[in-house]
Amino acid sequence: MCGSGPTDTSNSVLSTTSSFEVTAPEPSSGKLPEVVSNRIWSYESPTPGFEAIKGYLSFYADPWNCFVDGEAVQPQPGDFYGGWVTSEIDGIVKGAHGNWDPVV
């Protein structure tokens, strides 16, 4: 989850076209905006106990280069979960083909 917008563009140039699309121009390129579908979401009515995440944007780690404390993250396997996998995670990561086990 990300609490602030991208650092290479202004939030004023970002626009949503649905709950699953964001349009943003490439930084300083002068090119037309690129539409990235089904990669960003938010929880507007989170489950009780998780109210703190309301309104924050969540991003799949792909198609961008995402980092946590300077470490490049790997997207969680599959196309269902939006997790960011780092070296801090030990064990099985849920989402790999044929893998139904959670991180242990």
Image (cartoon, rainbow, N blue to C red):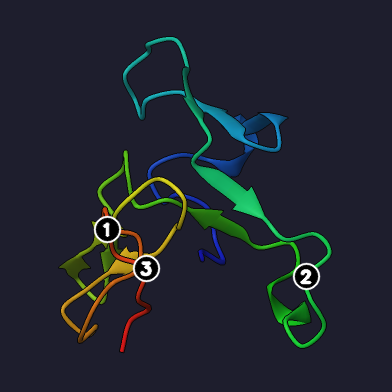
Circle nearer the N terminus (1, 2): 2
- Quarter of image, res 16: top right
Q: Where residue 49 appears, x then y in whole percent?
A: 76, 88
Residue on which the image places disc 1? 96
Residue on which the image places disc 2? 46
Q: Residue at x 70, y 38 (%)?
A: 19
| Numbered disc 3: secondary structure | loop
Q: Nearer the viewer, residue 101 or 55?
A: 101
Q: Where residue 4 appears, x then y in whole percent?
A: 54, 61
In the rendered view, does 41 fall on the left or right side of 32? right
Task: Tell me which amino acid carries mark 2.
Answer: Pro
Q: Residue at x 27, y 58 (%)?
A: 96
Q: Where residue 94 appears, x then y in whole percent?
A: 35, 68
Nearer to us: label 1 or label 2: 1
Task: Tell me which amino acid carries mark 1.
Answer: Ala
Task: Tell me which amino acid carries mark 3.
Answer: Trp
* Alpha carbon distance from label 1 to label 2: 26 Å
Circle nearer the N terminus (3, 2): 2
| Numbered disc 1: secondary structure | loop
* Alpha carbon distance from label 3 to label 2: 24 Å
